[in-house]
Image (spheres, rainbow, N blue to C red):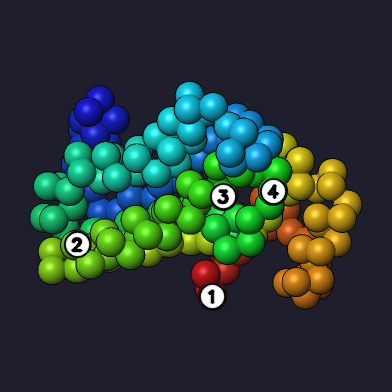
Amino acid sequence: EQLVAKALEHCGGVDFLVCSAGVNPLVGSTLGTSEQIWDKILSVNVKSPALLLSQLLPYMEKRRGAVILVSSAAAYYPAKELGVYNVSKTALLGLTRTLALELAPKDIRVNCLVPGIIKTDFSKVLHENESFWKNFKERHQLQRQVGFGDLLVHMWLGRGS
């Protein structure tokens, strides 16, 4: 509620929402994960975007807004090291489809951005696993790997983004 109040105070309204926060406090299997870790990952990665949007919806309806939920390649190509994180990012695809149906009559667009693996500390467990990285590159025919900075430059400065 405080975030919504600050956004309205600072911007006077809300035209769009980008939900890119994500957590993965555990490297390990899905079935070996505690309920506490399940709750944390699903709460931040899936529940929070939906609840934040529900708070912003009355203001976005006035301005025909847009929503972008950021998922991950893990939704389509799960890594065994990322268990519950894979599940949460797959759930974002379902949330996107559902919200798109529900909000289309209000003229609010909902899309999902699914970036590949971006070389950051967050994805370090994948970059350090040579067999995973080799298989991933082969499956996706990667010609080159981009870093987070390259992605930002393309998104914000590139005409095709």
Badge nearest the viewer, 2 or 1: 2
Q: Which mark is residue 80?
A: 4
Question: In screen coordinates, is 17 left or right of 8?
Answer: right
Q: Please say if the residues under marks 2 and 4 sit with CB atoms less than 8 Å apart.
A: no
**Vertical placement of 70 versus 102: above or below?**
above
Q: Between disc 4 and disc 1, whose residue precedes? A: 4
Looking at numbered disc 4 in the image, what kind of residue is underneath it? Lys
Most foreground residue, 63 or 100: 100
Q: Please say if the residues under marks 3 and 1 sit with CB atoms less than 8 Å apart.
A: no
The residue under label 1 is: 160
Residue 19 image point, x, y percent: 41, 47
Badge nearest the viewer, 3 or 1: 3
User: In percent of the image, x 27 and y 39: which residue is there?
Assistant: 51
Circle 1: element type: loop
Badge nearest the viewer, 2 or 4: 4
Q: Please say if the residues under marks 3 and 4 sit with CB atoms less than 8 Å apart.
A: no
Q: Which mark is residue 103?
A: 2
